[in-house]
Amino acid sequence: MRLSLNPEDFTYTGKKKLSLKDAPNLIPPLYKGKKEYKKFLQEYQDETNELQKMMYAHDRYSMLLIFQAMDAAGKDGTIKHVMSGINPHGLQIFSFKKPSTNELDHDFMWRTSKCLPERGRLGIFNRSYYEEVLVVKVHPEILTKYQLIPKEFITDVEEVFQQRYEDIKNFEKYIHRQGIRVMKFFLNLSKDEQKNRFIDRIDRQDKNWKFSEADVKERHFWPQYMEAYEQAINATATEHAPWYVIPADDKRNMRLIVSQLILDEMRKLDMHYPIVTEERKAELQQIRKDLTES
């Protein structure tokens, strides 16, 4: 089965500009009820697992899936549902929070660079180096007060972010040439839906632990974050590392769209299981015979 959607509606490669005020947070359901949603998701999970096993055996490509969003957009749930059933052997997931003292003693991409997926694996970044042009752009005092950069390099703060966009583009071009396919997802949640989800976290005991007053404080900077996301996406969207802007108010729709986009990219990879030579086949048959007779 395949969803009735046009991937181009969500894809940004630098050829067209993103305007977040025009990008939908919600589209009509792509599924007819919960049963069909589960059927779609299960089929996508199964095929993703099969392709990942081939990727692991082929041992040439890897994929880096980056998830960025405002709080409560559903990054954790999307990763959980899309990747459910994938062999853990071929999956690497990293979540990036506030930088530690050790991380601040390195360049801004160090902590993520060392977590890039190995060949044959799917790597997932729950937040990423893009925080350096999102949170830091909204709160530039992080750059000037807490990041240990020599003063002569941060006299023009806006120029710093332009340089970081360029550094990110170069980095993604580099890792693409090493066989890492980069897919970047922005889960486009509306401000009203975020409010509803925050209230739900307060009202439900099993979700209280997910609620943070800091998230509400950041909500006051919503316009600045939307501007930062729009600028970052437009500045770093390329053919080899596209951005996908996914309507996030309907979690099920969001998960299905992300699943199909990942599968579409995996299907493009020139992968196959290692070819077993006739000589090796004969060796294996002899080993099998010896085992049978032992």
Image (cartoon, grey):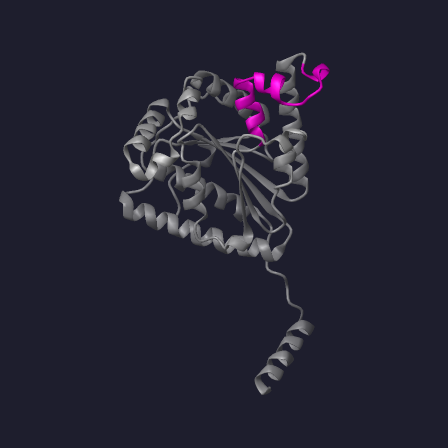
Q: Is residue 78 above or below residue 35?
A: above
Residue shown at the point (40%, 25%) measured from the top left: 213
Q: Nearer the viewer, residue 23 or 49?
A: 49
Tell me if residue 123 can be seen.
yes
| Residue furthest to the bottom | 293
Where does residue 143 sit, x and y in percent of width and height? 61, 19
Report whether 169 appears left or right of 44: right
Q: Nearer the viewer, residue 155 or 172?
A: 155
Look at the magenta stretch and give its main secondary structure.
helix
Q: Is residue 142 above or below residue 124?
A: above
| Residue furthest to the top | 155
Q: Quadrant of the C terminus?
A: bottom right
Residue shown at the point (33%, 30%) measured from the top left: 197
Residue 153 is covered by the magenta coloring? yes
Q: What stretch of residues is rendered in magenta?
A: 129-154
Where does residue 207 sit, x and y in percent of width and height? 34, 37
